[in-house]
Image: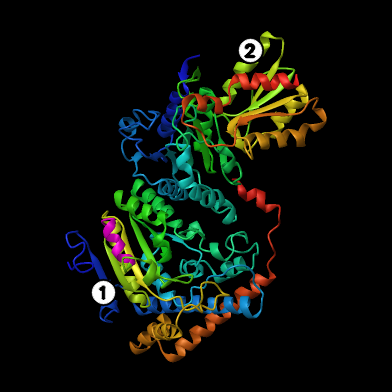
């Protein structure tokens, strides 16, 4: 137990754990074999390739309209968390949800077609980019485009799991920005009050549009806010997929033991602007360069190459496969139909 | 038939649905040992235990949010928001989240929640504990809005609301809680989206909402003595709105008064008037008269509050303008 800040809060019971970079010897202990590691890397590359394509379609080809918030640079979090769930989790996503959707096993075709507003999309074209992580059969429960608002809803999912004595967990993805909303604070308090099986997964990508987390999160770290709700907080290297995986397993096991929620702050970086059209001129280029060196995909592929889990040829082949899959998703989307206007009333009420 | 109060009818609906379906549970502030701020839930904790009658901290957004999440997982939560004035805190969850989930997901999601609340107009609770703004929620496609005016409707509509796969805002009226009426003991449904002709008449239609239905019936009784025959229509739900029953009645009588005790501008009476103009204009023999509360916040001072509200005298006066 060390003080949170010098001289303050020292009398409180609190627990903040840090997980930074994993010793490769730990990998086996986590139950990750070669094929699973490659699957994780493949999924990260899938998300990155998808987002590169989306950016191209919006900005350079003007083929897509509306908003799109790219997950570029945060891939380790969606993949680490969703793989750690092993099908035992219900996920609540955000406006920046392409990565969550793909990591939950929604196909690139369905996600891409949704961005095109086509009836073959995951929400039949009615949701768009900010609502792609919705497929209850896959555990993707809802994606709120209002920052912070899906967090109380995730609490309700945790409540349902506890109510029915089910062994799964609910996961709320949100950003550093969300932790400044009232809904978020109400949600954490209520989850702790009822000791619900929830993983609060904060993707601290350092910015809420242009507002730096370093200024807006006034106690310094999102994880410290766990103290106020009597739950454990964790600070995790969010650009290391194995650290993400390990932290999530830990929080999930704790939830399954009936010990309640955990707040995990994954430190990462929004490598692109807030949305596709934002050039992020409000932040220093040196900072971007610093984070580029911590690119989660380069780090993970380098590790797997070093460990001999994958060869350079394998990696090349995998990248090409993914590229082809994304191209197919675009072709599929272009060929698909728009939804009929008559559908709108049918789905407004059940 | 046995008579019970409006509050007892609500309690009975909840009780019977909880006995029938283990997925139904309650959450809200002071609903457990306290029995709800108006004792509507008295005894529920003893019968169903703290897992199904869940007291919450003061967190309106999280109460409704938690209900939504539980509903997405297959449960049927009934959340209570103590006063309608507190509902705006949870309105983002109810309107921007719940009401849009089926739509935004292309029909994949369903959100069977009921949010119960009540308006306390007429109890000298001042501007922040008396409000009644049902139109905010009428303007939210995907959300049903139910406002029973009798114990019979309260029980049947609440049972329907709980069994409905859409989010339902169930607005009770504090002043009606002690009103008694005939209520069958067995469970029954009053369909949401069907208006009810509370009293048949020939000369004029009064379309009234929630407690003002009771005032309209008093007015009808009084005018009967003067030989004026008044038909009283209660929409019962504002979303969906049963426009047909309303316009059919006006087609029959040729005259209409619309009455509700929310603010006049952009209020319930505005939509009801528009409904009649669109659906029965050619049948009107006189202008439509609106009876509503003024466009000011609700005053504390009891005589002023009384004057602010809609009473049977106001409705009698309105009817006499056009009959």
Judge whether residue A54 is colored magenta: no
The span from disc 2 to disc 1 (Cα, nearest Å) is 83 Å
Residue A29 circle label: 1
At a point 45% along the width and 33% down the height, the residue shown is: B126
| Residue at (38, 30) in percent of width and height | B41
| Residue A230 on the magenta span | yes
Q: Verify CB contact (< 8 Å) between mark 2 and mark 1.
A: no
**Pointer 1 local density, CA inside 10 Å: few below 14, some 14–19, many at least 20:** few
The dot on residue B29 is none
Question: Quick one: A48 or B141, which is closer to the camera?
Answer: B141
Point out residue B294 in the picture as x, y percentages from the top left corner: 60, 33
Q: Position of residue B20 (x, y in %)?
A: 43, 33
Q: Secondary structure at mark 1?
A: helix
| Subunit under mark 2 | B
| Comparing labels 2 and 1, the label whose residue is closer to the camera | 2
Q: Residues within 10 Å of mark 2 (few under 14, many from 20)?
A: some
Q: Where does the magenta region start and end?
A: A222-231
Name the residue beneath numbered marker 2.
B222
Which x, y percent locates residue A156?
40, 50
A209 relative position to A241: left or right: right
At x 38% / y 40%, what residue is drawn?
A: B28
Q: Is residue A32 visible?
A: no
Q: Quadrant of residue A178?
A: bottom left
């Amino acid at each position: 137990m060390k003080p949170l800040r010098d001289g303050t809060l020292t009398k409180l019971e609190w627990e903040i754990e840090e997980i930074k970079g994993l010793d490769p010897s730990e990998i086996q202990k986590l139950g990750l074999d070669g094929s699973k590691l490659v699957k994780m890397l493949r999924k990260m590359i899938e998300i990155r390739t998808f987002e590169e394509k989306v950016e191209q379609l919006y900005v350079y080809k003007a083929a897509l309209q509306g908003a799109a918030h790219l997950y570029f640079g945060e891939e380790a979090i969606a993949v680490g968390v969703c793989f750690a769930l092993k099908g035992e989790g219900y996920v609540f996503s955000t406006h920046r949800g392409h990565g969550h959707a793909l990591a939950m096993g929604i196909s690139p075709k369905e996600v891409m077609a949704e961005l095109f507003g086509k009836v073959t999309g995951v929400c039949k074209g009615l949701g768009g980019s900010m609502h792609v992580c919705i497929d209850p059969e896959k555990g993707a429960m809802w994606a709120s485009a209002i920052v912070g608002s899906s967090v109380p809803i995730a609490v309700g999912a945790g409540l349902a799991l506890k109510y029915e004595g089910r062994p799964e967990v609910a996961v709320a993805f949100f950003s550093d920005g969300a932790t400044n909303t009232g809904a978020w604070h109400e949600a954490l308090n209520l989850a702790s009050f009822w000791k619900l099986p929830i993983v609060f997964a904060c993707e601290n990508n350092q910015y809420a549009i242009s507002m730096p987390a370093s200024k807006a999160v006034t106690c310094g770290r999102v994880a410290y806010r766990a103290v106020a709700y009597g739950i454990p907080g964790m600070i995790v290297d969010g650009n290391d997929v194995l650290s993400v995986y390990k932290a999530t397993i830990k929080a999930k096991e704790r939830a399954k033991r009936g010990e309640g929620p955990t707040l995990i702050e994954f430190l990462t970086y929004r490598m692109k602007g807030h949305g596709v059209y934002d050039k992020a001129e409000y932040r220093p280029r040196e900072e971007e360069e610093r984070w580029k060196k911590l690119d989660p995909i380069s780090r993970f592929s380098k590790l797997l190459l070093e460990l001999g889990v994958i060869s350079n040829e394998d990696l090349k082949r995998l990248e090409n496969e993914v590229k082809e899959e994304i191209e197919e998703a675009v072709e599929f989307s272009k060929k698909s139909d728009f939804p009929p206007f008559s559908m709108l009333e049918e789905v407004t009420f059940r | 038939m046995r008579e019970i109060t409006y509050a007892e009818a609500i309690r009975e609906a909840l009780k019977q649905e909880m006995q029938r379906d283990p997925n139904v549970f309650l959450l809200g502030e002071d609903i457990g040992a306290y029995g709800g701020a108006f004792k509507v839930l008295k005894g529920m904790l003893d019968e169903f235990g703290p897992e199904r009658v869940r007291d919450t901290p003061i967190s309106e957004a999280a109460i409704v949010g938690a209900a939504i999440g539980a509903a997405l997982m297959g449960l049927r939560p009934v959340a209570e928001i103590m006063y309608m004035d507190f509902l705006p805190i949870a309105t983002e969850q109810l309107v921007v989240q719940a009401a849009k989930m089926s739509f935004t997901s292309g029909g994949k999601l369903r959100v069977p929640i009921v949010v119960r609340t009540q308006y306390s107009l007429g109890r000298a609770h001042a501007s922040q504990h008396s409000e009644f703004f049902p139109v905010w929620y009428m303007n939210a496609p995907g959300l049903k809005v139910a406002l029973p005016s009798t114990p019979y409707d309260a029980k049947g509509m609440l049972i329907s609301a709980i069994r409905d796969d859409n989010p339902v805002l169930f607005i009770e009226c504090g002043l009606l809680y002690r009103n008694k009426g005939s209520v069958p003991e067995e469970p029954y449904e009053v369909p949401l989206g069907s208006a009810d002709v509370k009293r048949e008449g020939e000369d004029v239609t009064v379309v009234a909402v929630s407690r003002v239905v009771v005032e309209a019936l008093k007015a009808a009784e009084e005018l009967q003595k003067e030989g004026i025959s008044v038909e009283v229509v209660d929409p019962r739900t504002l979303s969906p709105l049963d426009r047909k029953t309303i316009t059919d009645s006006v087609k029959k009588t040729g005259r209409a008064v619309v009455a509700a005790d929310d603010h006049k501008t952009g209020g319930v009476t505005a939509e009801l008037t528009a409904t009649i103009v669109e659906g029965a204009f050619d049948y009107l023999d006189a202008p439509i008269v609106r009876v509503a509360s003024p466009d000011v916040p609700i005053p504390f001072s009891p005589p002023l509050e009384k004057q602010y509200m809609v009473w049977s005298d106001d409705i009698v006066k309105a009817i006499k303008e056009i009959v």
